[in-house]
Amino acid sequence: MTTAKDLFIIALHLGSPDRPVGQGDLSLTLAGAELIDLISAGAVTLDGDRIVPDRGPTVDDRLLAEAAAALEGRAPYERVEDWLWRRGRDLAGAYQSALEEDGVLSQGRRGRFRSGADSVEPADTPARRQALERWEGGEPVLVGLASAAGVPGGQPQDGPGSEDEAVTTVLLTVGDAVMELEAVRQRRAIENAAFANVWRGP
């Protein structure tokens, strides 16, 4: 299992029913999780905030391989922030479909997302147990990504070390992207409210 799949399971399993994880937030953090796994696999490196692919190493996960294939292969390469927005588009739905196909998700009585995944929950599988072990062990990357997505309660044991500068860059950029998405939501809510007031009249 990849960090992105573990993240999806944790978000679905632990997201609050009162404040479910938004698909946009989750999609951005899933894209960040993919990038971190590609860094760990040696498939990419970061040059500052630019993603430099290494076409040598391969990955055996289908969605992660798709992510690697989607990388910009020429200089000046893609910035981490731009990658999150491009790769993250509807990514939560892609992971839901993949995990359903793998039997990791089953029909549930209540959903954890605002839309799209309102009838599935993690099945009792080794994949679910592995994700929970990482979460309960306070694995800092998984906890950091889940926290950015809006999953409550994670307690990281340690932060990424100084040798993990690239991972730290990705985590910080994910947090900024999620905040930017929330700011967009708030602006739209204000604009919609103002528009409704115009039509209501005095």
Image (spheres, grey):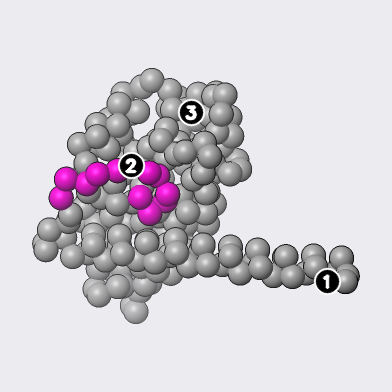
In front here: 185 or 57? 185
Residue named by callout 2? 153
Residue named by callout 3? 121
Taking the magenta stretch, the answer to whether it contains residue 151 is yes
Which of the two labelled residues, at mark 3 and mark 1, occupies the earlier sequence position? 3
Q: Which mark lies nearer to you, 3 or 1?
A: 1
Mark 2 to mark 3 CA distance (whole Å): 19 Å
> Where does the image place residue 1, in percent across and percent down from the top left?
31, 36
Task: Identify the secondary structure beneath mark 2.
Answer: loop
In front here: 107 or 66? 107
Q: As shown in the figure, which amino acid type bears the numbered disc 2?
A: Gly
Task: Identify the secondary structure beneath mark 3.
Answer: strand
Mark 2 to mark 1 CA distance (whole Å): 42 Å
Residue named by callout 1? 198
Which of the two labelled residues, at mark 2 and mark 1, occupies the earlier sequence position? 2
Q: Which range is magenta?
A: 147-158
In front here: 185 or 33? 185
Residue at 29% over, 43% down = 154
